[in-house]
Image (cartoon, rainbow, N blue to C red):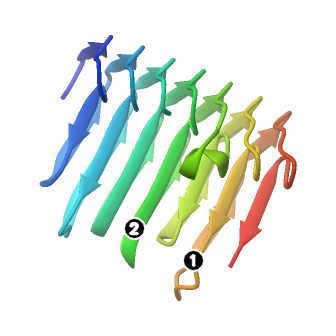
Amino acid sequence: INYGTIKNSAKHGVYITQGTSKIRNSNVSNNAQRGIHVYNYPGGNSLSIEGNTISSNAQGGVYVYMYAGVSTISDNTITNNSGTGLIATDGASATTHTISKNFISGNIGSGGYGAYGGGIFVNNPNATISNNIVINNSGSTGGGMYVTDGGYNVTQTITNNVIAHNSAAQGGALYLSS
């Protein structure tokens, strides 16, 4: 998908189950569930979500579950979603997510995964999280960002992010868990 407008869907704006996918330069907004929902199983594929505006979706902005593979989520504006702005997870610690240069603001995490990390929730995968601006988000744990290795032997690096004015009962800016 390139230069698309995906809005007002009764379900997820974009739902991807398999294959190598690219979503670029698109507007994904006002959908009844998540803006972009990726459930890539059995995996081994690549995913690119770049340069999009993802806003005002009812169950969160972006959800990426990959069993194995590589994802790049960069240069997006992810704002005002009723649910976590960005969730990146995997089922076998065989995924690598690169999350960079995103502006993530005004997301309200609630219920299920959404309770963890109002702005960003990373669960299990290898991840590099860098050069993002994560401001004015809220969640019950990790208002700005919640990052956990889920007990797997993974590498997760968090560098050069601005994480400010987020709120949560635990870890207003950042919550790290093992």
Instruction: Name the residue at 49% across, 20% down.
Output: 55
Residue identified by numbered label 1: 150
178 left or right of 175? left
Marking on residue 87: none
Q: Position of residue 138 (x, y in %)?
A: 75, 36
The amino acid marked with disc number 2 is Asp
Question: Could you say whether the residue bearing mark 2 is in a helix, strand or loop?
Answer: strand
The amino acid marked with disc number 1 is Gly
Q: Earlier in the sequence, mark 1 or mark 2?
A: 2
42 left or right of 12? left
Marking on residue 90: 2
Q: Position of residue 84 (x, y in %)?
A: 58, 39
Question: Could you say whether the residue bearing mark 1 is in a helix, strand or loop?
Answer: loop
Indicate whether 74 appears above or below 124.
above
Instruction: Name the residue at 47% across, 71% down.
Output: 125
Closer to the camera, 12 or 106? 12
In which quadrant of the rendered view does residue 5 lie? top left
Q: Are marks 1 and 2 in contact (CB under 8 Å)?
A: no
Q: Position of residue 46 (x, y in %)?
A: 23, 58
For the N terminus, the quadrant is top left
